[in-house]
Image (tube, helix red, strand yellow):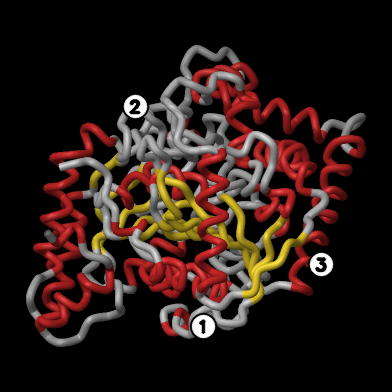
Amino acid sequence: MLTRLTIEELGARFRRGEATPSQAAAAYLERIGALDGRVKAYLTVTRETALGQAAEADARFAAGRPLSPLDGVPVAVKDLLCTRGIRTTCGSRILETFVPPYDATVVARLRAAGAVLLGKLNLDEFAMGSSTEHSAFFPTRNPWDLDRVPGGSSGGSAAAAAADLAAATLGSDTGGSIRQPAAFCGTVGLKPTYGRVSRYGLVAFASSLDQIGPFAKTVADAALVLGVIAGADPRDSTAVDVAVPDYRAALSGGVEGLRVGIPAEYFIEGLDPEVEAAVQAAVAVLRGLGARTEGVSLPHTRYGLPAYYLIAPAEASSNLARYDGVKYGLRAPGGRHLVEMYGRTRAAGFGAEVKRRIMLGAYALSAGYYDAYYGKAQRVRTLVRRDFQQAFERVDVLAAPTTPGVAFRLGEKTDPLQMYLNDILTIPVNLAGLPGVSVPAGFTQAGLPIGLQLIGRPYDEATVLRAAHAYERATTWHQRKPPLP
Ligand code: GLN
């Protein structure tokens, strides 16, 4: 079955002439047709685009001239990434019919590498959430248990990767939105360093935190996708010009002598005992492979979540000011003058969680409260970053749970704070701008996936991926498949 193969295996078949990109695209489209009515990972399936791109890839392989390791590989992207000529909704009514006139840089790089676009994936509205239940259209289901959430906000991207509805996908991570759903769906999810991947064409949520990264069936596949999307971009000055290593090649070498820090503050009260046991077992596996593990302290961890819920909404409130019914997206009828048109449009176009964030952010930025809230949160952010800097003087990577619990039931978390707490172990990494990956590290008794989070120094994705790869080689969790046909 072509849809089961990793990117590496699929590419090998293409090169040997044992399969064609058109066959792979057809196999994925068929699987999407058969299963996505239940998983609901896709908002838009770009069948014609996929078949056209696949036919072009067929010709390149026939001529012996593939463009890259991703040539002919069927992928899909979070519907927060602009795709020229293809609807990009951000999971919101306000952009329900928006068709961007340009591609996000990462989408253009995937195209240039020959990847085949299967479609656009569901998410929490504007990436605000941890379950995809805040999508204006429908929630995505967890492939391991269709009554449970896939996590979020990149829940469609995680579910599609886990259910073999794409060979790899892209998501974005502002406070955990790649790593948390990867953990919930039992797939690999990598958030690169802030600045490693261009955000041009990523619809902004919180610009100082947002970062794009891959979901894949294996760490090696994630490394291949990162290699294609990473690197400086004249269209995004925050995508800096730091050399992009050959991530695939950097996976070899193992973890012998690697110093792995275990942050005490990540083994918090309320941590699911099954998650804790799995992560401790994973640490023991790394130790068995020759890594040197030691306890470290990140004392400001507990202030990460409150600081994030000032900084992220503050940035969101300014970023989302552009949706006013004037240039693009929804315009609600009946306004008697401009201000009324703005009000009606935003009232009708945004969901409750987005409105909550806009209000929180506008409040945190307002004249009388700016220093007390936004200013203070920025100072806390510096303390969180320093914690990591100090830890990385002693260790090369940090190992911790990705999430405090496993996938919860749809409709289970109705209190926003309960939802926000999902990201308590991922948010500090965004505040510090560091790379982090979640890899499958076991299952609960009930059969739900558990994620191991590995965190690295700025721009040191190579070491994070090498440790993750060594762990993956030594375990079989990533080989398990959800109970779907
Ligand atoms: N769940 C977090 C939030 O709602 C993080 C979301 C994200 O990373 N995009 O803000």
Q: Residue at x 65, y 51 (%)?
A: 207
Cβ atoms under marks 2 and 1 closer than 8 Å: no
Residue 207 versus residue 444 in the image, above or below: below
As drawn, 272 above or below 70: above
The type of residue carrying mark 1 is Pro
Q: Quadrant of the C terminus?
A: top left
Between 322 and 197, which is closer to the camera in this rendering? 197
Q: Residue at x 11, y 64 (%)?
A: 22
Which is nearer the N-term, disc 2 or disc 1? 2
Q: Amino acid at mark 3?
A: Gln
Badge 1 element: loop
Q: State the separation of the CA atoms marked 2 and 1.
A: 41 Å
Query: Horizontally, is 74 left or right of 456 in the view?
Result: left
Numbered badge on residue 245: 1
Q: Is residue 316 left or right of residue 9?
A: right
Instruction: Examine the image and state in which quarter residue 393 appears.
Output: bottom right
Find the distance from the CA under tag 3 to the CA under tag 2: 42 Å
Does residue 93 appear in this view?
no
Q: Which mark is residue 147?
A: 2
For label 2, the crowd category at 10 Å Cα-Cα, with few meaning under 14, some 14 to 19 and many 20 or more, is some
Residue 401 visible in the picture: yes
Give how far apart the Cα atoms at labels 1 and 3 are.
Answer: 25 Å
**Nearer-the-camera pick, 194 or 413:** 413
Instruction: Look at label 2 and name its amino acid.
Output: Asp
19 to the left or right of 221:
left
Which residue is denoted by mark 3 in the rendering?
A: 390
User: Which is in the foreground here, disc 1 or disc 3?
Assistant: 3
Residue 21, image x, y percentages: 15, 67
Q: Earlier in the sequence, mark 3 or mark 2?
A: 2
